[in-house]
Image: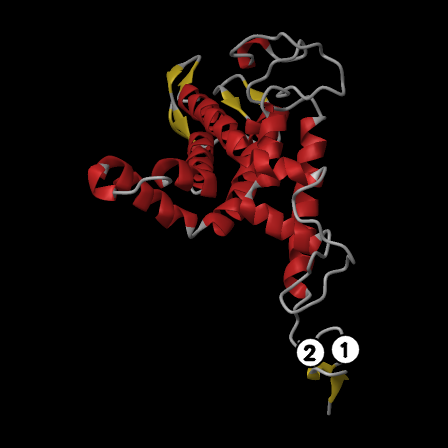
Amino acid sequence: MTTTATRPGRGPGRAAIGAKTLRNDRWWLPPLLTFAGLTAWVIYATVRVFMHKWYWVEEFHYLTPFYSPCVTERCVPEAAHIGRFLPGWWIIPDAALTLPFLLLFRLTCYYYRKAYYRSFWLSPPACAVPDAHKDYSGETRFPLIFQNAHRYAFYAAAIISLINTYDAILAFHSPKGFGFGLGNLILLGNVVMLWAYTLSCHSCRHIVGGRLKHFSEHPVRYRFWTFVSALNTRHMQLAWITLGTLAVTDFYVMALSAGWFGDLRFIN
């Protein structure tokens, strides 16, 4: 039973409910799983980025996306497709040219904002559950104001997807000539998923079809907009799938480079 608070001269107000939320379902489970999943991935990726080894398979030209493009003096020359122009200090990732932009793209992604706002900041942890913070200023102050850079991060992510595509194509041409193995399938599958996630971005959808008053006058853009819109409905799933494909691709290349097992070859 609840009582109704009375405001002087204004009649009944809101019900005086002492509980923080009336939800009796397991509303805490999704943010908990998200916290565990993102934390595990960040730990794995951080360890791999700063291992500085087991990223290149010379025999098949496999390069893990965590080290692409490899631009430090520490890089294997064959894996440094655009040169080695950064010092080989331990603190500098071998893919320092791309990793900051990929991190910015993921951090400012509309889905990931929801994910880490709820799971890490509890702001709010779920619908109809109070925010853990007393004050809320939106994304108008430092550091959240940088969320507005998402569109520019999208451009960088598109360029990096092109680089990953080049790596996947290059892997078909090993020192022995044309070849095809399980590693090629994994690299190719990762690239396809990365493109799907990148193109499903809300910024991409706006760039393609935003500010158009008449779709009939822009049939090509309209077709692309409908394609991107269909992908956009799966943006959350693609965000998680690409975390998985990146980890699987990196682990497979690492295992081959370390000699834990050999690549399953279909041709050459």
Residue picked out by circle 2: 22
| Disc 1 crowd, CA 10 A, few/some/many (<14, 14-19, 20+) | few
Residue density around tag 2, few if under 14, some if 14–19, many if 20 or more, within 10 Å: few
Task: Find the residue positioned furthest to the front.
Answer: 9
Name above or below for residue 55 compared with residue 244.
Answer: above
Q: Position of residue 108 (x, y in %)?
A: 59, 39
What quarter of the picture does the N terminus occupy? bottom right
Q: Which mark is residue 19?
A: 1
Distance between the alpha carbons at the discs numbered 2 and 1: 7 Å
Residue 233 vertical placement versus 26 (above, below): above
**What amino acid is found at the position of numbered circle 1 in the picture?**
Ala
Residue at 71% over, 9% down = 87
Residue beneath the point at 47% across and 22% down: 163
- The numbered disc on residue 214 is none
Residue type indicated by callout 2: Leu
Quadrant containing the C terminus in the rendered view: top left
Q: Secondary structure at mark 1?
A: loop
In this image, 84 relative to 204: left or right? right
Indicate the secondary structure of the residue bearing disc 2. loop
Where residue 173 appears, x then y in whole percent? 40, 17
Left or right placement of residue 134 versus residue 263 in this view: right
Q: Is residue 185 above or below residue 36?
A: above
The total number of labels drawn is 2
Q: Label 1 near label 2: C-beta < 8 Å?
A: yes
Near-viewer residue (185 or 191): 191
Instruction: Report if residue 251 is visible in the image.
Output: no
Q: Left or right: 214 with respect to 174?
A: left
Identify the residue at the far bottom of this view: 1
